[in-house]
Structure formats: structure tokens, C-alpha cells
Amino acid sequence: MREATVGIVKPKRLTFAAHPDQLVLESGLKLGPISLQYETYGELNDERSNAILVFHALSGDAHAAGYHKEGDEKPGWWDNAIGPGKAFDTDRYFVICSNIIGGCKGSTGPSSENPKTRKPYGLQFPMITVKDMVNAQAALLDHLEVGQLLATVGGSMGGFQALQFAVSYPNRCKLVIPIATAGRQSAQNIAFNEIGRQAIMADPHWNGGDYYAGEAPVDGLSIARMVGHVTYLSDETLMKRFGRKAKTGTCTNGGLSLQPYFEVESYLRHKGNSFTRRFDANSYLYITRAIDLFDLAPGCDSLSSAFRDCRSRFLALSFSSDWLYPPYQSEELVEGIQQSGLAVEYHRIESSYGHDAFLLEADKVEEVISRFLIHEGRKKYFEVDQGYPIS
């Protein structure tokens, strides 16, 4: 029997920003019309005050919880945190999750039709930023007639969006929950993303981004995903799960074998290959570039200047074994929030799962998140206190 779930959910789509009212991007270019695919869970209350906007990470989408049809093997990507009695209790809250612009799971992105050419955009799709992503999702909130959110929440790139929304729309968000994230992208993470982009562009089928009428650059995208996936794990997880186990039937005699010898090699190839069946290579290029450009306070050592106009309350969570966005980056974020005079609570969670802990350790953070939403949600929006001790 399945545990408590939101059940069967139906994806929805909003189309907006048609000419001449296109969305003006941070680059100054315009994009439109725009489609956003989204899902909602729970019910919006009469006061329209219980809405929580969930932002997804790089490879995520709008399907955060529940199932699309009976018989689905896997639920939405954050089903262990969204649902009746869970951290984001759908008996209490109205939860919204939207696929970002630039994506490939129902929202407008490089694989969408360019209205000027009637062909996929490819590299004619304009560059996007995290700020552009949240601006599009603010239009979704307008459509849903949600003036002010109870909370924004997200892990990894989703945390970037949650923070950016609070900064861009200081009067529309009471609470912010950034998880396993940072206030700016690090040089190490930019380096890993560049390896992934180069792998895609080196694939002969990439064809300068114009591959939609032929073979997709699946080999390059698979390698990009393999590199990225390693950063989501931890040394402890890899050792416990694979160690130095060799695949059955492998042999070191004779010439060099290019087939997987170790179990971990086979695992990474499977992850890379399966990713190519659900993701667009150009979307990977655009989204990783947006991630790399993210910086709440460009040119400033401290992040405090970013929160100058912000009035939200924050709950920041990090995980001990996360080396993609290690705890010190959350602590820098917390310090910047505190310096701006805002209330912030911080928890460093012990976990061996690495960066993926934000998806897997829902049981460890459920009580903290539930208490924060209930306790802080009752306070007046513009009330500011001295914050919380860091734990």
C-alpha cells in the first residue's frame, strides 16, 4: 500500500506573454508567448494565504508529488515531502510547483517552437537567468490570484529561485526555505557545469544546437549527466553502495576492455543513458549557464546587500556530506541574512547522502520545516526580531 499521497494529479499549463506583452528578460530581450507547466496540491484557503511555491532543481520539473496515472511506478520527485501529514502538509497548505522557462518538461524552452520560424528555437532561444525564471513564475501566481505566498522553498537550483523570489518580490513572500544551496554559484560548480556543456557541444550530433530534425546528442548529454550525478553523491554513499565491486563475468586478462568493469561504472552509464530519454541537451546548456550566472550580490563580498528590501523570514538547511553546496556556503548565506537584520534559523543536518540528501532525508527535516511553517506563519509579515541561534 502506498503511503499518504496527494494521489493522481493532472498537469496544468498557463500560456501568457503573447505579443506585444512579452516577458522582458534580464538581458533586455523579450520572450513570448510563454507556456508554463505546473501542478498544484491541496486547496487554496478562503484568505488565499496558505500557498507555498516549490522550485525544482536542474533536472526536476513540475511533477513534485503524487502520480499522473494509476500504475505509475514512481511518484513526483519530492513526494516524500509533499502530501498529507508531510513536511509540506497538503491538508494545510496549497502547494504549487512549476517547470521553469528554459526547461523541456512542458514549459517554453529551446526545444519549443519559435513563433517566428515555426521550428524549434535551438540556440535562437534567448539566454535566461534565475531572475527570469522567477519572474515567469510570478506571472503564474497572478494567474492563480495568489497575491502573497506563505513560503517559497527549494533545494539546489530551487534554492536559488526561492532566494531570488524573496529578493525580487519582497512583498509577496512571508517565509523562505533555501535547502542545500547558496547565495551565489561557486567556481568549483561552474567548472563542473562547463565540463558538462563541453561534453554536449563536442557530440557531433549537437550540430550547433540544431539537432531536432535528426539525432540528438545523447552521448554528450549522457556524459554531462554522469559528471553532474557524481557531484550529487558522497564518497561514503559510493563506497557503501559500490565500493570496488566488479561486475560479474568481468576479466582483466587480454586487451583493454572498454566495457564497465566496476559496478559504479555501470551505474553511472545507466544514469547517463536514462537521463537522455527525458531531458533536452540545449535545455541543459541554458539552465547550467543560468545557474553559473546566479549571484544575489554581484561584486560584493557579503550577501547582505541583496536582502536590503527583503522582509521575509528564513529557514536555511544544509547537509554535512554535501560537497556540491557544502554547509559553509549556507552559513555565508545565513550570515548575510543576519547582517541585513532579518530573522533566520539555520540547521546543519547530519547525512551521508551528499547533495541528494535534500531529496532523500525528508524524515530528518520534516519536524523542523513543519514547526517553522506553523510558528512563523502565524506572525505578522513585517514583524522583525533578532533571529535565531545557529544550530
Image (cartoon, rainbow, N blue to C red):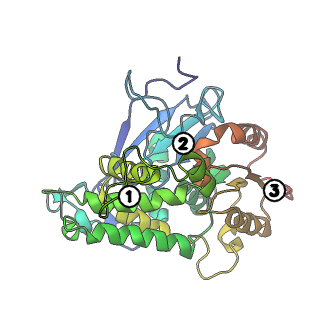
Q: Which residue is mark 2?
A: 146
Which residue extends farthest front? 253
Q: Amino acid at mark 2?
A: Val
Label 1: which secondary element? loop
Element carrying mark 3: loop
In the rendered image, which quarter is residue 117 located in? bottom left
Residue 290 showing in the rendered view? yes
Count residues near mark 1 (Cα–Cα under 10 Å), then give few for <14, some for 14-19, many for 20+. Answer: few
Assign a secondary structure to mark 2.
loop
Q: Is residue 26 visible?
A: no
Closer to us: 121 or 182: 182
Is 4 placed above or below 95 here? Answer: above
At 46% from the left and 60% from the top, the residue drawn is 228
The front one of 345 and 363 is 363
Q: Is residue 194 left or right of residue 234?
A: left
Q: Nearer the viewer, residue 151 or 158?
A: 158
In front: 80, or 200?
Answer: 200
Q: Is residue 13 above or below residue 236?
A: above
Count residues near mark 3 (Cα–Cα under 10 Å), then give few for <14, some for 14-19, many for 20+.
Answer: some
- Disc on the earlier residue, 3 or 2: 2
* Marker disc for residue 227: none
Above or below 380: residue 295? below
Residue type, numbered disc 1: Thr
Image quarter of residue 106: top left
Left or right: where 100 falls relative to 34: right
What x and y, as percent, mark residue 307?
A: 68, 67
Disc number placed over residue 384 in the picture, else none: 3
Q: Amino acid at mark 3?
A: Val
Residue to which mark 1 is pinned:
252
Residue 298 % position (x, y): 58, 78
